[in-house]
Image (cartoon, helix red, strand yellow):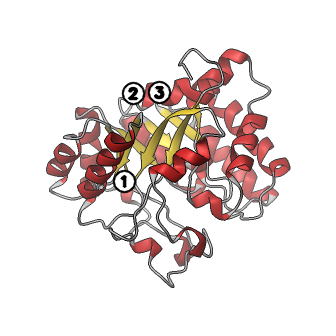
Amino acid sequence: MTDEAEDYLVDAHHHFQDIETFEYPWLRPNQAQPLEGDLSAIRRNFLPAEYREIVSTWPVTKSVHVQNGWIDHDPVGETRWISSRIEEYGLTAAIVGYADLSRPDLESTLVQHLAYPAFRGIRQILNWHENPSLRVACTPDLMERREWRSGFARLSAHGLSFDLQIYWPQMEMALELAQDFPQTEIVLNHIGMPIDRSPVALRHWSTALQRLATAENVSVKLSGFGLGNPHWSQTEIVPILQSVIRTFGPERVMFGSNLPVDLLFSSSRKIVETFEAAILFLSSEDRKKTRHANAERIYRL
């Protein structure tokens, strides 16, 4: 399919994994994940051949591999492996890797990542929740700490983006970060993770999202529909996705499958059909932006 076709997709958020060869601590046997639930169905290899087979029923031509909980003492190892898979399978793909932005050896890590042509940015998961089982970050104020912000400043020096994964109570800190570093593209993962979808919680999430959207260097992925809500329905999620599109505008939203994680909660067909239903209200030109143009621009695909 050519780039001129209106309906081709860029999948801006997926993961590959080879658990037989490499270590993924979050996928260890008997390791419970409160947000995702029982991981047994994805505690297996998920490689480009299977991904390509799944998306062959979609018009996906390009994609973005996002760091997948690889052992944190060797972050460049994942980038090296993904680069080899991109080359082997002839994929048109970008890589968002991992680095701890507070580490004193960050510059060396970034330079090593950048040795691989597909490398485009960093994701360091910052989720902090009052429930300890839903926390990932080591502290709630990491975005405000001097050493971490010093590391964040290095991203723009290398032309790198940052994939931001947080809950809504952290969005005010994220807004300050985005305003202080307007030259850095920040991509909010999984629609800001509204894991509590009660009416009150959604109002808080929506208000926080509207504030964050005032920073023009922040965009958002329509992805992770089942995170925290494994029994989600299209009827429930489409209005939420359309609210996000209206908040950020069609110039700053993109599609992400979150494969294989979201296979825990739904079929791949349901994921893409829900996205397509959510963008039906847009003009043809704006649908092109959400389907591919925004991701191509931000991740330089």
Q: Amino acid at mark 1?
A: Glu
Residue found 45% across the figure and 72% down from its top = 26
Residue found 57% across the figure and 75% down from its top = 40
Q: Amino acid at mark 2?
A: Arg
Which residue is the site of mark 1? 144
Q: Amino acid at mark 3?
A: Glu
C-alpha gap between disc 2 and disc 3: 5 Å
Instruction: Characterize the local packing of mark 2: few (<14), some (14-19) or many (20 or more) Cα atoms within 10 angstroms.
Output: few
Residue found 62% across the figure and 53% down from its top = 224
Is disc 2 placed on a helix, strand or loop? loop
Residue found 52% across the figure and 77% down from its top = 132
Q: Reading the chain from its start, which is encountered first: label 3 or label 1? A: 1
Q: Is residue 201 left or right of residue 161?
A: right
Q: Reading the chain from its start, which is encountered first: label 2 or label 1? A: 1
Q: Is residue 78 left or right of residue 162?
A: left
Among the 4 quarters of the image, the one containing residue 18: bottom left
Q: Say whether marks 2 and 3 touch (CB < 8 Å).
A: yes
- For marks 2 and 1, give the one nearer the viewer: 2
Which residue is the site of mark 3? 296
Q: Say whether marks 2 and 1 touch (CB < 8 Å).
A: no
Q: Which mark is residue 227?
A: none
Among the 4 quarters of the image, the one containing residue 77: bottom left
Decide which of 123, 201 is in the foreground and name it: 123
Instruction: Characterize the local packing of mark 3: few (<14), some (14-19) or many (20 or more) Cα atoms within 10 angstroms.
Output: some
The C terminus lies in quadrant: top left
Which residue is the site of mark 2? 300
Is disc 3 placed on a helix, strand or loop? helix
C-alpha gap between disc 3 and disc 1: 30 Å
Decide which of 206, 55 is in the foreground and name it: 55
**Residue 163 appears anywhere in the view:** yes
